[in-house]
Image: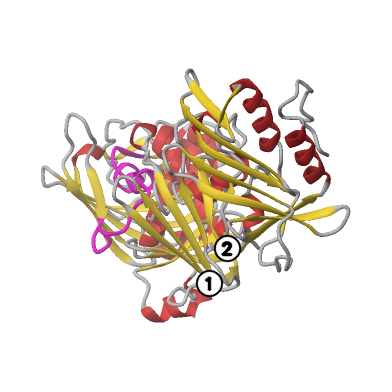
Amino acid sequence: MMDEEKQNLSEQEELAQAGMDTFFADAPAAQAKQEKSGGMSKNVKALIASVSVLVLLGGGLAAAMTATMLHDKGNGDGDSSGSVQNTTEATEMISLNESLAEDVTKVEISAKEDFTVYRSAEATEDAEAVYSIKGMEDIPMNKNLLSTVVRNASALSANSLVEEDAKDLGKYGLAQPAADVTMHYADGASFQIAIGDESPLDNTATYCAVDGDVYLVKSTLMSNYCTEPSFFVTNTILEEPDEADYPIIESVRIQREDLDYDIYLEYADDGESSGGTVAAHVMREPVFVYLSPEKSTDVTHGMFGLTALENTAVHPTDSQLQQAGILEPFCTVEMACDDGNTYQLYLGNTYTSASGTKCYYAYLEGVDVLYGVSETSAVWATMQPGDITSANIFGTMVWDIATLDVTAGDKKLKFEGEGNKDEYHVTKNGTPCDKERFRLFYRFILSIYGEELCLGEEIPDAAPDASIHVVTQDGEEDYTVKFYRLDHLNMMVTMNDEPVYRIRSSCLDTLAHNMEIFDTEEEFTLTWR
Protein backbone atom coordinates (compact mmCIF):
# COMPACT_ATOMS: atom_id res chain seq x y z
CA MET A 1 0.00 0.00 0.00
CA MET A 2 1.12 3.57 -0.65
CA ASP A 3 1.00 4.58 3.04
CA GLU A 4 3.27 1.69 3.96
CA GLU A 5 5.78 2.75 1.33
CA LYS A 6 6.07 6.35 2.54
CA GLN A 7 9.07 7.17 4.71
CA ASN A 8 8.75 8.21 8.31
CA LEU A 9 9.42 11.91 7.82
CA SER A 10 10.40 12.75 11.36
CA GLU A 11 12.94 9.93 11.43
CA GLN A 12 14.36 11.06 8.11
CA GLU A 13 14.76 14.66 9.26
CA GLU A 14 16.47 13.56 12.46
CA LEU A 15 18.88 11.32 10.57
CA ALA A 16 19.55 13.97 7.97
CA GLN A 17 20.49 16.52 10.62
CA ALA A 18 22.74 14.03 12.33
CA GLY A 19 24.47 13.23 9.07
CA MET A 20 24.93 16.86 8.12
CA ASP A 21 26.38 17.74 11.51
CA THR A 22 28.87 14.94 11.13
CA PHE A 23 29.90 15.83 7.61
CA PHE A 24 30.83 19.39 8.40
CA ALA A 25 32.45 19.25 11.80
CA ASP A 26 32.06 16.24 13.97
CA ALA A 27 34.09 13.42 12.44
CA PRO A 28 36.75 12.59 15.05
CA ALA A 29 40.39 12.94 14.12
CA ALA A 30 42.31 9.75 13.53
CA GLN A 31 44.35 8.57 16.53
CA ALA A 32 47.16 6.08 16.78
CA LYS A 33 45.64 2.61 17.05
CA GLN A 34 45.87 1.20 20.56
CA GLU A 35 47.21 -2.29 21.00
CA LYS A 36 44.87 -4.84 22.52
CA SER A 37 45.90 -5.95 25.98
CA GLY A 38 45.25 -9.60 25.15
CA GLY A 39 42.33 -9.82 27.55
CA MET A 40 41.14 -8.22 30.77
CA SER A 41 43.50 -7.81 33.72
CA LYS A 42 42.91 -9.68 36.96
CA ASN A 43 41.90 -6.43 38.65
CA VAL A 44 39.29 -5.69 36.02
CA LYS A 45 37.95 -9.24 36.17
CA ALA A 46 37.72 -8.94 39.97
CA LEU A 47 35.86 -5.67 39.56
CA ILE A 48 33.35 -7.27 37.22
CA ALA A 49 32.89 -10.16 39.59
CA SER A 50 32.25 -7.77 42.47
CA VAL A 51 29.36 -6.19 40.54
CA SER A 52 27.81 -9.40 39.26
CA VAL A 53 24.49 -8.12 40.50
CA LEU A 54 24.38 -6.09 37.29
CA VAL A 55 23.41 -9.25 35.46
CA LEU A 56 20.00 -8.86 37.03
CA LEU A 57 19.59 -5.60 35.18
CA GLY A 58 20.01 -7.38 31.84
CA GLY A 59 20.71 -6.17 28.28
CA GLY A 60 22.10 -2.82 27.28
CA LEU A 61 21.66 -1.15 30.69
CA ALA A 62 23.99 -3.64 32.36
CA ALA A 63 26.51 -3.27 29.56
CA ALA A 64 26.44 0.51 29.82
CA MET A 65 26.88 0.50 33.60
CA THR A 66 29.75 -1.97 33.29
CA ALA A 67 31.39 0.33 30.74
CA THR A 68 31.02 3.25 33.12
CA MET A 69 32.72 1.37 35.98
CA LEU A 70 35.51 0.21 33.70
CA HIS A 71 36.15 3.82 32.71
CA ASP A 72 36.20 4.93 36.35
CA LYS A 73 38.59 2.11 37.27
CA GLY A 74 40.88 3.00 34.40
CA ASN A 75 40.90 6.65 35.46
CA GLY A 76 41.69 5.86 39.10
CA ASP A 77 38.33 7.31 40.15
CA GLY A 78 36.22 5.15 42.41
CA ASP A 79 33.04 7.21 41.93
CA SER A 80 30.81 5.08 39.68
CA SER A 81 28.08 7.72 39.45
CA GLY A 82 29.72 9.55 36.50
CA SER A 83 28.02 9.13 33.08
CA VAL A 84 29.63 7.46 30.10
CA GLN A 85 29.88 10.88 28.44
CA ASN A 86 31.82 12.38 31.38
CA THR A 87 34.29 9.51 31.56
CA THR A 88 34.68 9.51 27.79
CA GLU A 89 35.78 13.12 27.81
CA ALA A 90 38.65 12.15 30.09
CA THR A 91 39.64 9.13 27.99
CA GLU A 92 41.75 9.06 24.86
CA MET A 93 39.78 8.18 21.73
CA ILE A 94 40.42 4.72 20.31
CA SER A 95 41.26 4.53 16.61
CA LEU A 96 39.24 1.89 14.78
CA ASN A 97 39.97 2.74 11.15
CA GLU A 98 42.87 4.83 9.91
CA SER A 99 41.98 4.74 6.19
CA LEU A 100 40.89 8.06 4.65
CA ALA A 101 37.63 8.96 2.98
CA GLU A 102 39.26 10.10 -0.25
CA ASP A 103 40.55 6.56 -0.78
CA VAL A 104 37.10 4.90 -0.53
CA THR A 105 36.11 3.00 -3.67
CA LYS A 106 33.03 1.23 -2.38
CA VAL A 107 30.83 0.92 0.72
CA GLU A 108 28.61 -2.13 1.15
CA ILE A 109 25.72 -1.66 3.58
CA SER A 110 23.26 -4.22 4.89
CA ALA A 111 20.55 -2.38 6.86
CA LYS A 112 16.84 -1.95 6.16
CA GLU A 113 17.88 -2.85 2.62
CA ASP A 114 21.15 -4.05 1.16
CA PHE A 115 22.79 -1.42 -1.04
CA THR A 116 26.20 -0.37 -2.31
CA VAL A 117 27.66 3.11 -2.58
CA TYR A 118 30.53 3.28 -5.06
CA ARG A 119 32.85 5.86 -6.58
CA SER A 120 31.45 6.58 -10.02
CA ALA A 121 33.89 9.36 -10.93
CA GLU A 122 37.42 10.02 -9.72
CA ALA A 123 38.34 13.30 -8.06
CA THR A 124 39.96 15.95 -10.25
CA GLU A 125 41.74 19.22 -9.55
CA ASP A 126 38.44 21.04 -9.98
CA ALA A 127 35.97 18.60 -8.46
CA GLU A 128 35.63 16.05 -5.71
CA ALA A 129 34.99 12.39 -6.43
CA VAL A 130 31.40 11.47 -7.27
CA TYR A 131 29.65 8.61 -5.48
CA SER A 132 26.50 6.81 -6.57
CA ILE A 133 24.22 4.09 -5.26
CA LYS A 134 24.27 0.98 -7.41
CA GLY A 135 21.04 0.66 -9.34
CA MET A 136 20.04 4.28 -8.64
CA GLU A 137 22.43 6.09 -10.96
CA ASP A 138 19.52 7.82 -12.70
CA ILE A 139 18.19 9.26 -9.44
CA PRO A 140 19.37 12.69 -8.20
CA MET A 141 21.07 12.33 -4.82
CA ASN A 142 21.66 14.60 -1.86
CA LYS A 143 25.43 14.76 -2.30
CA ASN A 144 26.12 15.97 1.23
CA LEU A 145 24.13 13.12 2.77
CA LEU A 146 25.69 10.53 0.50
CA SER A 147 29.17 11.78 1.39
CA THR A 148 28.56 10.84 5.03
CA VAL A 149 28.52 7.18 3.98
CA VAL A 150 32.05 7.61 2.65
CA ARG A 151 33.38 9.84 5.41
CA ASN A 152 31.83 8.76 8.70
CA ALA A 153 33.41 5.32 9.02
CA SER A 154 36.74 6.46 7.58
CA ALA A 155 39.37 7.70 10.08
CA LEU A 156 36.92 6.43 12.70
CA SER A 157 37.58 6.54 16.43
CA ALA A 158 35.55 5.14 19.33
CA ASN A 159 34.73 6.84 22.60
CA SER A 160 35.63 3.71 24.58
CA LEU A 161 36.11 -0.06 24.53
CA VAL A 162 33.15 -1.78 26.20
CA GLU A 163 34.08 -5.46 25.90
CA GLU A 164 36.80 -7.44 24.17
CA ASP A 165 35.91 -10.67 22.36
CA ALA A 166 32.26 -10.24 23.33
CA LYS A 167 30.35 -13.52 23.55
CA ASP A 168 26.84 -12.15 24.09
CA LEU A 169 26.33 -9.61 21.34
CA GLY A 170 22.58 -9.55 21.89
CA LYS A 171 22.79 -7.28 24.91
CA TYR A 172 24.33 -4.60 22.70
CA GLY A 173 21.85 -5.02 19.84
CA LEU A 174 24.59 -6.64 17.79
CA ALA A 175 23.22 -10.17 17.44
CA GLN A 176 21.08 -8.76 14.62
CA PRO A 177 22.76 -5.41 13.91
CA ALA A 178 20.89 -2.36 12.68
CA ALA A 179 23.53 -2.25 9.94
CA ASP A 180 26.61 -4.12 8.77
CA VAL A 181 29.06 -1.88 6.90
CA THR A 182 32.11 -2.81 4.84
CA MET A 183 34.37 -0.03 3.61
CA HIS A 184 36.65 -0.77 0.62
CA TYR A 185 39.72 1.34 -0.16
CA ALA A 186 41.90 1.91 -3.19
CA ASP A 187 44.90 0.13 -1.64
CA GLY A 188 42.87 -3.06 -1.21
CA ALA A 189 42.24 -2.56 2.50
CA SER A 190 38.79 -3.02 3.97
CA PHE A 191 37.10 -2.18 7.25
CA GLN A 192 34.02 -3.85 8.72
CA ILE A 193 31.79 -2.54 11.46
CA ALA A 194 28.46 -3.69 12.86
CA ILE A 195 26.10 -1.11 14.37
CA GLY A 196 23.89 -1.96 17.33
CA ASP A 197 21.79 -0.14 19.94
CA GLU A 198 22.31 3.28 21.41
CA SER A 199 23.68 3.27 24.95
CA PRO A 200 20.74 3.49 27.39
CA LEU A 201 22.79 5.80 29.60
CA ASP A 202 24.07 8.04 26.82
CA ASN A 203 22.04 8.42 23.66
CA THR A 204 24.93 10.19 21.93
CA ALA A 205 26.85 6.89 21.80
CA THR A 206 26.05 3.67 19.94
CA TYR A 207 27.41 0.14 20.45
CA CYS A 208 29.49 -1.02 17.49
CA ALA A 209 31.44 -4.24 16.90
CA VAL A 210 34.81 -4.38 15.17
CA ASP A 211 36.77 -7.67 15.00
CA GLY A 212 34.62 -9.14 17.78
CA ASP A 213 35.19 -6.25 20.21
CA VAL A 214 32.40 -3.90 21.28
CA TYR A 215 32.93 -0.15 21.41
CA LEU A 216 30.91 2.99 22.02
CA VAL A 217 30.97 5.25 18.95
CA LYS A 218 29.36 8.63 18.45
CA SER A 219 25.77 7.99 17.32
CA THR A 220 25.70 10.71 14.66
CA LEU A 221 28.57 8.97 12.87
CA MET A 222 26.61 5.74 12.57
CA SER A 223 22.99 6.80 12.06
CA ASN A 224 23.11 7.28 8.28
CA TYR A 225 24.25 3.67 7.77
CA CYS A 226 21.03 2.44 9.40
CA THR A 227 18.73 3.84 6.72
CA GLU A 228 17.60 2.78 3.27
CA PRO A 229 18.76 3.98 -0.16
CA SER A 230 15.83 6.35 -0.65
CA PHE A 231 17.02 8.34 2.37
CA PHE A 232 19.86 9.73 0.22
CA VAL A 233 17.60 10.89 -2.63
CA THR A 234 17.50 14.68 -2.80
CA ASN A 235 14.14 16.29 -2.15
CA THR A 236 14.99 19.09 -4.58
CA ILE A 237 12.86 18.07 -7.53
CA LEU A 238 14.47 20.46 -10.03
CA GLU A 239 17.71 22.23 -9.22
CA GLU A 240 17.69 26.01 -9.49
CA PRO A 241 20.32 27.15 -12.01
CA ASP A 242 23.12 29.49 -11.04
CA GLU A 243 22.35 33.13 -11.76
CA ALA A 244 24.79 33.19 -14.68
CA ASP A 245 23.12 30.18 -16.27
CA TYR A 246 19.50 31.03 -15.43
CA PRO A 247 17.43 30.65 -18.60
CA ILE A 248 14.55 32.82 -19.67
CA ILE A 249 11.30 31.02 -18.92
CA GLU A 250 9.48 31.52 -22.18
CA SER A 251 6.15 30.06 -21.12
CA VAL A 252 4.26 28.22 -18.41
CA ARG A 253 1.09 26.28 -19.17
CA ILE A 254 -1.14 25.01 -16.37
CA GLN A 255 -3.84 22.44 -17.04
CA ARG A 256 -6.19 21.43 -14.24
CA GLU A 257 -9.18 19.15 -13.93
CA ASP A 258 -11.14 21.75 -11.98
CA LEU A 259 -10.77 24.44 -14.68
CA ASP A 260 -12.42 24.41 -18.10
CA TYR A 261 -9.57 26.49 -19.54
CA ASP A 262 -5.78 26.49 -19.49
CA ILE A 263 -3.75 29.14 -17.73
CA TYR A 264 -1.00 30.13 -20.15
CA LEU A 265 1.71 32.60 -19.16
CA GLU A 266 4.25 33.94 -21.64
CA TYR A 267 7.43 35.96 -21.44
CA ALA A 268 6.79 39.40 -22.93
CA ASP A 269 9.49 41.68 -21.55
CA ASP A 270 10.56 44.21 -24.15
CA GLY A 271 13.50 45.37 -22.06
CA GLU A 272 11.79 48.62 -21.07
CA SER A 273 11.07 49.45 -17.44
CA SER A 274 7.43 49.49 -16.41
CA GLY A 275 8.15 50.82 -12.96
CA GLY A 276 7.76 47.40 -11.39
CA THR A 277 3.97 47.45 -11.75
CA VAL A 278 3.82 44.53 -14.17
CA ALA A 279 5.88 41.37 -14.46
CA ALA A 280 8.02 40.26 -17.38
CA HIS A 281 5.37 37.60 -18.11
CA VAL A 282 1.78 38.17 -19.19
CA MET A 283 -1.25 35.90 -19.13
CA ARG A 284 -2.38 34.90 -22.62
CA GLU A 285 -5.04 32.40 -21.59
CA PRO A 286 -7.82 32.35 -20.56
CA VAL A 287 -7.55 36.10 -21.29
CA PHE A 288 -4.79 38.59 -21.89
CA VAL A 289 -3.90 40.40 -18.66
CA TYR A 290 -0.72 41.68 -17.07
CA LEU A 291 0.78 39.91 -14.09
CA SER A 292 1.86 41.24 -10.73
CA PRO A 293 5.60 40.73 -10.12
CA GLU A 294 5.07 39.94 -6.44
CA LYS A 295 2.18 37.53 -6.95
CA SER A 296 3.26 35.67 -10.08
CA THR A 297 6.91 34.77 -9.49
CA ASP A 298 6.16 31.54 -7.62
CA VAL A 299 3.97 30.43 -10.52
CA THR A 300 6.31 31.40 -13.36
CA HIS A 301 9.61 30.45 -11.69
CA GLY A 302 8.59 28.11 -8.87
CA MET A 303 9.49 24.87 -10.62
CA PHE A 304 13.18 25.78 -10.32
CA GLY A 305 14.29 24.92 -6.81
CA LEU A 306 11.00 23.16 -6.02
CA THR A 307 11.60 21.04 -2.91
CA ALA A 308 9.47 18.11 -1.83
CA LEU A 309 8.54 17.36 1.75
CA GLU A 310 9.50 13.73 1.15
CA ASN A 311 9.99 11.13 -1.53
CA THR A 312 7.47 8.32 -1.36
CA ALA A 313 8.83 5.89 -3.96
CA VAL A 314 12.00 5.53 -6.03
CA HIS A 315 11.48 3.91 -9.46
CA PRO A 316 7.72 3.78 -8.77
CA THR A 317 5.68 1.10 -10.49
CA ASP A 318 2.72 1.88 -12.74
CA SER A 319 0.51 0.69 -9.91
CA GLN A 320 2.08 3.20 -7.51
CA LEU A 321 1.77 6.00 -10.06
CA GLN A 322 -1.85 5.07 -10.68
CA GLN A 323 -2.63 5.02 -6.99
CA ALA A 324 -0.95 8.41 -6.56
CA GLY A 325 -3.03 9.90 -9.39
CA ILE A 326 -0.01 10.62 -11.59
CA LEU A 327 -1.07 8.62 -14.66
CA GLU A 328 -4.17 10.84 -14.87
CA PRO A 329 -2.90 13.92 -13.04
CA PHE A 330 -5.10 16.53 -11.43
CA CYS A 331 -2.66 19.22 -12.57
CA THR A 332 0.01 19.36 -15.28
CA VAL A 333 2.55 22.18 -15.43
CA GLU A 334 4.72 22.65 -18.52
CA MET A 335 7.61 25.12 -18.38
CA ALA A 336 9.52 25.94 -21.58
CA CYS A 337 12.89 27.74 -21.40
CA ASP A 338 15.00 29.53 -23.97
CA ASP A 339 17.86 27.05 -23.50
CA GLY A 340 15.76 24.45 -25.29
CA ASN A 341 14.66 22.58 -22.16
CA THR A 342 11.01 21.86 -21.42
CA TYR A 343 9.89 20.47 -18.06
CA GLN A 344 6.66 18.63 -17.25
CA LEU A 345 5.49 18.43 -13.64
CA TYR A 346 2.50 16.27 -12.71
CA LEU A 347 0.51 16.77 -9.51
CA GLY A 348 -1.77 13.92 -8.50
CA ASN A 349 -3.87 13.02 -5.47
CA THR A 350 -3.58 14.68 -2.09
CA TYR A 351 -2.58 12.94 1.13
CA THR A 352 -1.57 13.87 4.66
CA SER A 353 2.07 13.32 5.61
CA ALA A 354 3.22 11.79 8.88
CA SER A 355 3.80 15.32 10.19
CA GLY A 356 0.18 16.28 9.40
CA THR A 357 0.96 18.36 6.29
CA LYS A 358 -1.40 18.26 3.32
CA CYS A 359 0.60 17.18 0.26
CA TYR A 360 0.21 16.45 -3.43
CA TYR A 361 1.92 13.49 -5.01
CA ALA A 362 4.30 14.96 -7.58
CA TYR A 363 6.31 13.52 -10.46
CA LEU A 364 8.74 15.36 -12.76
CA GLU A 365 9.03 13.85 -16.21
CA GLY A 366 12.50 12.32 -16.57
CA VAL A 367 13.13 11.93 -12.82
CA ASP A 368 11.85 8.53 -11.72
CA VAL A 369 10.89 9.48 -8.18
CA LEU A 370 7.43 9.92 -6.68
CA TYR A 371 7.52 12.91 -4.35
CA GLY A 372 5.21 14.45 -1.81
CA VAL A 373 5.00 18.26 -2.17
CA SER A 374 3.28 20.40 0.43
CA GLU A 375 0.14 22.20 -0.68
CA THR A 376 1.82 25.57 -0.08
CA SER A 377 4.66 24.65 -2.46
CA ALA A 378 2.39 23.13 -5.13
CA VAL A 379 1.05 26.58 -6.03
CA TRP A 380 -0.17 25.54 -9.49
CA ALA A 381 -2.75 23.15 -8.01
CA THR A 382 -4.79 25.85 -6.28
CA MET A 383 -4.01 29.25 -7.86
CA GLN A 384 -6.66 31.12 -9.79
CA PRO A 385 -5.99 33.63 -12.60
CA GLY A 386 -6.98 36.53 -10.37
CA ASP A 387 -4.41 35.53 -7.76
CA ILE A 388 -1.46 36.58 -9.92
CA THR A 389 -2.75 39.35 -12.15
CA SER A 390 -1.75 42.98 -11.97
CA ALA A 391 -4.46 45.59 -11.61
CA ASN A 392 -3.06 47.23 -14.75
CA ILE A 393 -5.25 46.96 -17.82
CA PHE A 394 -2.79 48.86 -20.02
CA GLY A 395 0.95 48.23 -19.78
CA THR A 396 2.32 49.46 -23.09
CA MET A 397 4.99 52.16 -22.80
CA VAL A 398 3.83 55.41 -24.38
CA TRP A 399 6.86 55.67 -26.68
CA ASP A 400 6.19 52.17 -28.07
CA ILE A 401 2.76 53.10 -29.43
CA ALA A 402 2.22 53.04 -33.17
CA THR A 403 -1.54 53.66 -33.07
CA LEU A 404 -3.94 54.48 -30.24
CA ASP A 405 -7.64 54.67 -31.15
CA VAL A 406 -9.92 55.99 -28.40
CA THR A 407 -13.69 56.10 -28.75
CA ALA A 408 -16.23 57.25 -26.16
CA GLY A 409 -19.76 57.84 -27.33
CA ASP A 410 -19.58 59.97 -30.48
CA LYS A 411 -16.09 61.27 -29.66
CA LYS A 412 -13.13 59.64 -31.46
CA LEU A 413 -9.40 60.30 -31.24
CA LYS A 414 -6.84 58.55 -33.41
CA PHE A 415 -3.19 58.92 -32.47
CA GLU A 416 -0.29 57.68 -34.58
CA GLY A 417 3.28 57.72 -33.33
CA GLU A 418 6.78 56.76 -34.34
CA GLY A 419 10.29 57.02 -32.94
CA ASN A 420 11.60 56.39 -29.45
CA LYS A 421 11.68 58.07 -26.06
CA ASP A 422 14.26 60.61 -27.16
CA GLU A 423 12.77 61.35 -30.59
CA TYR A 424 9.05 60.58 -30.77
CA HIS A 425 6.49 62.15 -33.09
CA VAL A 426 2.75 61.79 -32.78
CA THR A 427 -0.31 62.95 -34.72
CA LYS A 428 -3.96 63.26 -33.62
CA ASN A 429 -6.55 62.60 -36.29
CA GLY A 430 -3.82 63.16 -38.89
CA THR A 431 -2.59 66.47 -37.45
CA PRO A 432 0.74 66.92 -35.59
CA CYS A 433 0.19 66.73 -31.86
CA ASP A 434 2.19 67.94 -28.87
CA LYS A 435 3.87 64.80 -27.55
CA GLU A 436 3.77 66.02 -23.94
CA ARG A 437 0.01 66.57 -24.18
CA PHE A 438 -0.30 63.09 -25.63
CA ARG A 439 1.87 61.65 -22.84
CA LEU A 440 -0.33 63.18 -20.12
CA PHE A 441 -3.49 61.91 -21.81
CA TYR A 442 -2.03 58.41 -22.04
CA ARG A 443 -0.94 58.68 -18.41
CA PHE A 444 -4.62 58.75 -17.50
CA ILE A 445 -5.27 55.66 -19.63
CA LEU A 446 -2.48 53.84 -17.77
CA SER A 447 -4.23 54.72 -14.50
CA ILE A 448 -7.26 52.64 -15.46
CA TYR A 449 -6.98 49.43 -13.46
CA GLY A 450 -9.14 46.40 -12.85
CA GLU A 451 -10.98 46.15 -9.55
CA GLU A 452 -12.59 42.73 -9.79
CA LEU A 453 -11.74 39.86 -12.17
CA CYS A 454 -14.82 38.57 -13.98
CA LEU A 455 -13.79 35.70 -16.26
CA GLY A 456 -16.51 33.89 -18.18
CA GLU A 457 -19.30 36.39 -17.61
CA GLU A 458 -21.77 37.33 -20.33
CA ILE A 459 -20.94 40.48 -22.28
CA PRO A 460 -23.89 42.89 -22.48
CA ASP A 461 -25.83 42.61 -25.72
CA ALA A 462 -25.18 46.21 -26.66
CA ALA A 463 -22.53 48.38 -28.24
CA PRO A 464 -19.65 49.27 -25.91
CA ASP A 465 -19.75 52.68 -24.27
CA ALA A 466 -16.06 53.17 -24.99
CA SER A 467 -13.14 51.34 -26.57
CA ILE A 468 -9.36 51.74 -26.75
CA HIS A 469 -7.31 49.97 -29.43
CA VAL A 470 -3.51 49.76 -29.00
CA VAL A 471 -0.90 48.63 -31.54
CA THR A 472 2.83 48.83 -30.82
CA GLN A 473 5.48 49.84 -33.32
CA ASP A 474 7.09 46.40 -33.26
CA GLY A 475 3.71 44.73 -33.84
CA GLU A 476 4.09 42.55 -30.78
CA GLU A 477 1.02 44.03 -29.08
CA ASP A 478 -2.33 44.54 -30.76
CA TYR A 479 -5.32 44.56 -28.42
CA THR A 480 -8.67 46.24 -27.89
CA VAL A 481 -10.16 47.15 -24.52
CA LYS A 482 -13.90 47.81 -24.43
CA PHE A 483 -16.02 49.28 -21.66
CA TYR A 484 -19.70 48.35 -21.06
CA ARG A 485 -21.75 50.29 -18.54
CA LEU A 486 -23.67 47.83 -16.36
CA ASP A 487 -25.39 50.40 -14.14
CA HIS A 488 -24.71 53.91 -12.88
CA LEU A 489 -21.93 52.58 -10.62
CA ASN A 490 -20.30 49.67 -12.45
CA MET A 491 -19.04 48.67 -15.86
CA MET A 492 -17.44 45.64 -17.47
CA VAL A 493 -14.03 45.74 -19.17
CA THR A 494 -13.23 43.25 -21.93
CA MET A 495 -9.89 42.45 -23.54
CA ASN A 496 -10.18 41.32 -27.16
CA ASP A 497 -13.86 40.58 -26.52
CA GLU A 498 -13.23 38.48 -23.43
CA PRO A 499 -14.60 39.70 -20.05
CA VAL A 500 -11.74 40.56 -17.72
CA TYR A 501 -12.65 43.10 -15.04
CA ARG A 502 -15.40 45.02 -13.35
CA ILE A 503 -14.56 48.63 -12.49
CA ARG A 504 -16.44 51.76 -11.42
CA SER A 505 -18.18 53.59 -14.22
CA SER A 506 -16.73 56.90 -13.03
CA CYS A 507 -13.72 55.91 -15.14
CA LEU A 508 -15.86 56.16 -18.28
CA ASP A 509 -17.02 59.65 -17.36
CA THR A 510 -13.43 60.80 -16.75
CA LEU A 511 -12.26 59.33 -20.06
CA ALA A 512 -14.97 61.25 -21.94
CA HIS A 513 -14.05 64.46 -20.11
CA ASN A 514 -10.33 64.18 -20.93
CA MET A 515 -11.10 63.54 -24.59
CA GLU A 516 -13.31 66.64 -24.64
CA ILE A 517 -10.59 68.95 -23.27
CA PHE A 518 -7.64 67.49 -25.22
CA ASP A 519 -7.30 70.50 -27.51
CA THR A 520 -7.44 72.98 -24.63
CA GLU A 521 -4.86 73.94 -22.01
CA GLU A 522 -7.03 72.61 -19.19
CA GLU A 523 -5.28 70.03 -17.05
CA PHE A 524 -6.37 66.43 -17.53
CA THR A 525 -8.14 64.70 -14.68
CA LEU A 526 -5.78 61.88 -13.79
CA THR A 527 -7.86 60.19 -11.09
CA TRP A 528 -11.27 58.61 -11.58
CA ARG A 529 -11.82 56.79 -8.29
Q: Which kind of residue does numbered mark 2 sit on? A: Ala
Query: Which residues, given as a range, are shown in magenta?
Result: 133-157
Q: Quadrant of residue 246?
A: top left
Q: How is the image coloured?
A: secondary structure
Q: Residues within 10 Å of mark 2 (few under 14, many from 20)?
A: many
Magenta stretch encompasses residue 156: yes
Magenta stretch encompasses residue 484: no
> x, y percentage for residue 417?
51, 31
Tell me if residue 132 can be seen. Answer: yes
Q: In the image, which disc is placed on residue 362?
A: none
Q: In the image, which disc is placed on residue 381?
A: 2
Q: Which kind of residue does numbered mark 1 sit on? A: Phe
Q: Is residue 312 left or right of residue 79?
A: left
Q: In the image, which disc is placed on residue 330?
A: 1
Residue at 78 percent across and 55 percent down: it is 491
> x, y percentage for residue 73?
49, 37
Q: Is residue 145 left or right of residue 503?
A: left
Residue at 23 percent across and 60 percent down: it is 134
Mark 2 touches mark 1? (CB < 8 Å): yes
